[in-house]
Amino acid sequence: MSDRYTKAVLTAIALTLVALVGQNAVGSAHAAGAITKVAICDAQNDNCANVGNDSPVVWPSTRNR
């Protein structure tokens, strides 16, 4: 009985150590460049969505045609 318990505890410790080593080996992720702003518009570019406010608003596009 004691042998099974010891094996289970040592296995758990070994798995935890492997997970920690793997986590440190991967490192941190960073963005590759600047932020790209995107406008969500209809197919004709007449109406664009205002994303970021509590309530979505659609306004006419100000793009020159």
Image (cartoon, rainbow, N blue to C red):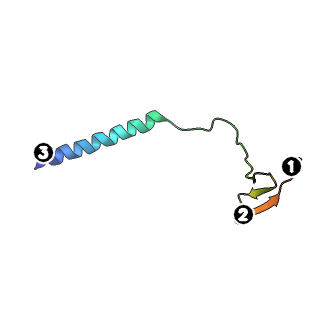
Disc assigned to residue 35: none
- Residue 12 is situated, as x and y percent measured from the top left of the image, at 27, 45
Q: Which element is circle 2 on?
A: loop
The crowding category of the residue bearing disc 1, from other C-alpha atoms within 10 Å (few below 14, some 14 to 19, many at least 20), is few
Question: In whole angstroms, how far apart are the C-alphas of marks 2 and 3?
Answer: 63 Å
Question: In whole angstroms, how far apart are the C-alphas of marks 1 and 2?
Answer: 20 Å
For this rendering, which residue is in front, 54 or 44? Answer: 44
Task: Give the residue displayed 23% in from the left and 46% down from the top.
Answer: 9
Reading the chain from its start, which is encountered first: label 1 or label 2?
Answer: 2
Task: Give the residue displayed 53% in from the left and 38% down from the top.
Answer: 28
Q: Is residue 50 above or below residue 2?
A: below
Reading the chain from its start, which is encountered first: label 2 or label 3?
Answer: 3
The crowding category of the residue bearing disc 3, from other C-alpha atoms within 10 Å (few below 14, some 14 to 19, many at least 20), is few
Residue located beneath label 2 in the image? 56
Question: In whole angstroms, how far apart are the C-alphas of marks 1 and 3?
Answer: 75 Å
Residue located beneath label 1 in the image? 63
Disc assigned to residue 3: 3
Reading the chain from its start, which is encountered first: label 1 or label 3?
Answer: 3
Task: Give the residue displayed 82% in from the left and 55% down from the top.
Answer: 46
